[in-house]
Image (cartoon, helix red, strand yellow):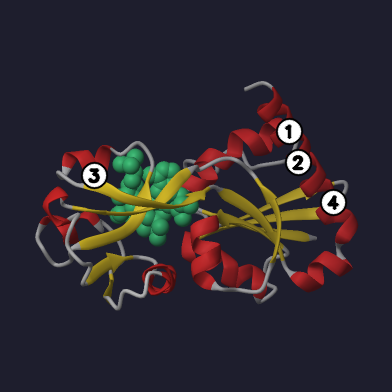
Amino acid sequence: MLTVALAKGRTVDDLMPLWRSAGLPAPDDLDDTRALVFEIPHDSFGTLRMLLAKPADVPAYVSLGVADLGVAGKDVLLESGRDVYELLDLGVAKCRLCVAGRPAEQASRPRRVATKYPRLADAYFRRFGQPVEIVGLSGSIELAAVIGLADRIFDLVQSGATLRANGLVVFDEVLDISARLIANRSSFRMKRPMIDIIWNSLDQEVRTRAASQ
Ligand SMILES: Nc1ncnc2c1ncn2[C@@H]1O[C@H](COP(=O)(O)OP(=O)(O)OP(=O)(O)O)[C@@H](O)[C@H]1O
Ligand SMILES: O=P(O)(O)OC[C@H]1O[C@H](OP(=O)(O)OP(=O)(O)O)[C@H](O)[C@@H]1O
């Protein structure tokens, strides 16, 4: 048996076309069920078990060994600080981690930063020697800048539509983000042949896509 923890929502939605065109098995009803565990009988794995987890929890599932593999954004991997192997940049669920705020605040010294990524935000502002207060929020981060809870937000930007709709602008682009294939360290040793099937299939498909762009 091989267990894969997938970040539900955007990540798994973007991943599944890649996963399927890589020839890997997936349940037909992944999109329209409330189930969180799927078991697929498979010649090479015995059973391939897929878990749909909250994105921020995937690194914990993998590092603690209840999942052998995982797929999660680079943002949540870095923020978690979990000790896992990062095997592959899957090139899906792409966005950028940015510092943003109201245009009028751009020239002022940052004081209070709202974010879902307190560790990464703290490290970023420390690099500039700027002591800031970090306000940890769990979503709709832009709201904090709009209503003046914070003078900076440290958040993901993809199309920029959310920033535009709220009158905010990017002050700095911190990091390119995409979904990554990760592995539990001991599974990587003990279940390497099964892991290789998934790793190699996805790697091949990522390369094929990159070559056709
Ligand atoms: N606008 C976006 N465009 C592309 N990828 C994104 C975007 N926002 C987030 N992501 C990526 O998708 C991952 C999951 O984002 P999503 O918005 O589905 O989850 P979430 O809001 O953290 O979930 P939840 O609220 O259920 O905990 C993020 O960790 C990031 O890697
Ligand atoms: O640049 P855009 O294409 O507008 O995408 C960026 C938005 O997407 C994410 O939010 P999400 O939709 O996950 O909602 P959340 O803030 O409640 O997590 C992110 O936190 C931004 O708010």
Disc ID at residue 163: 3
Q: Is mark 3 within 8 Å of ligand 2?
A: yes
Which tag, 3 or 1, sits closer to the chain's start? Answer: 3
Residue at horizontal 41%, vertical 67%? 124
Q: Is residue 152 left or right of residue 176?
A: left
Q: Amino acid at mark 2?
A: Asp
Residue at horizontal 52%, vertical 54%? 35
| 3D distance between C-alphas at marks 3 and 1 | 32 Å
Residue 211 in the image, given as x and y percentages of width and height: 70, 25
> Of 47 and 190, which appears nearest the observer?
190
Q: Which residue is mark 4?
A: 196
Q: Quadrant of the N terminus?
A: bottom right
> Of 109 and 30, which appears nearest the observer?
109
Q: Which residue is mark 1?
A: 207
Q: Quadrant of residue 20?
A: top right
At mark 2, the secondary structure is helix
Tags 2 and 1 in contact by the CB under 8 Å rule?
Answer: yes
At mark 3, the secondary structure is helix
Q: Amino acid at mark 1?
A: Arg
Q: Quadrant of the C terminus?
A: top right
Q: Which residue is mark 2?
A: 203
Residue 142 in the image, given as x and y percentages of width and height: 22, 54
